[in-house]
Amino acid sequence: MKALPKTTLLRRLIHEGCISMPGAFNAATAKLIERAGFPAVYVSGAGLANATAGVPDIGLLTLTEVARLAGYIAAAVSIPALADADTGFGGPENAARTVREFERAGLAGMHLEDQAFPKRCGHLTGKELVPAEEMAAKLSAAAGARSDADFLIVARTDARAVEGFDAAVERARSYLAAGADAVFPEALESEREFREFARRVRAPLMANMTEFGRSPLLSARRLGSLGYRMVIYPQGAFRVAMHAEEAFLRYLKRRGSQKAWIESMQTRKDLYELLGYDPKRGDNPPEVKL
């Protein structure tokens, strides 16, 4: 049986229930996410900016950079990948081009946000929004640019922290009317708000369970019962890795040997298995494409 396109598979998954999507900041992490049994992977804009360029999540990477990095992730796994497109890298024409580039990169969907550029992390203060009409124009252009009708376009609104909860609901409804397939209400502040948003916005919804943010850390099962279809964990794997790396490097600097950490390391054998590499063959697997 021919495998479903990843775009179609993602839509089927969210139609059938609520899916968890850990964030990958590189292709190796995406492979671990797939190996752990998750049905889809999220490509965090913050993760790419922080881990790849060592810069904060304020829209510093270009469309070309994000599409290439996200493309490595999408190509490394058989599960769908949904990517953070920030503000669409400009106006409506730029948002349309973003869709085309992300489709070429093999992504199954993306989300666009209604912040003004330069954007800020969604759980920080000091955010500014573009007018709802401007965001609607971007979404309309993005939807119209698809060559694959199943490519998922998620409208993220940061209005809760700027204009209030009711404004977030109204913006979400206008974004759906403009062509968005799903809605991502960023930085809701209580379980009651998650429940009320789902009651008032009838569409596939995404919840962001980022750590150290403004939202309570609800389980995927609970969010599913409230009406959400996608739950992302953008920086969890990155934060765990960075914490462990810092502890290791401090120990290595102090002791001058890594021997005490060997049991905490991924083995060479496990890495090769993850990458699908057989060193006895002396070359890379033939299916590898960069």
Image: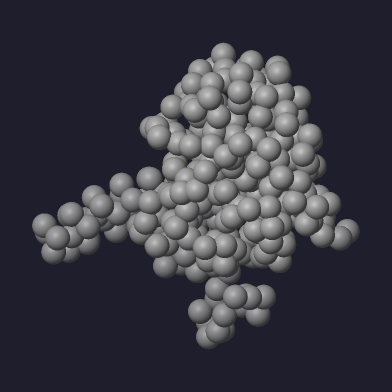
Name the residue nearer the viewer: 250 or 269.
250
Quadrant hosting residue 96: bottom right
Describe residue 177's horizontal placement relative to residue 107 as left or right.
Answer: right
The residue most toward the bottom is 282
Q: Residue at x 53, y 41 (%)?
A: 115
Q: Residue at x 64, y 15 (%)?
A: 196
Q: Position of residue 34 (x, y in %)?
A: 60, 52
Name the residue nearer the viewer: 41 or 256.
41
From the viewer's perspective, is residue 228 above or below residue 112?
above
Quarter of the figure that contains the N terminus? bottom right
Quarter of the figure that contains the C terminus? bottom right
Judge whether residue 81 can be spotted in this image: no
Q: Residue at x 65, y 80 (%)?
A: 286
Q: Residue at x 67, y 75 (%)?
A: 287
Name the residue nearer the viewer: 106 or 160.
160
Judge whether residue 52 can be spotted in this image: yes
Q: Position of residue 83 (x, y in %)?
A: 60, 51
Q: How is the image coloured?
A: one colour
From the viewer's perspective, is residue 246 above or below residue 268?
above
Name the residue nearer the viewer: 238 or 288.
238
The residue most toward the right is 1
Q: Position of residue 197 (x, y in %)?
A: 64, 20
Quadrant hosting residue 250: bottom left
Q: Position of residue 136 (x, y in %)?
A: 70, 40
From the viewer's perspective, is residue 115 above or below residue 44?
above
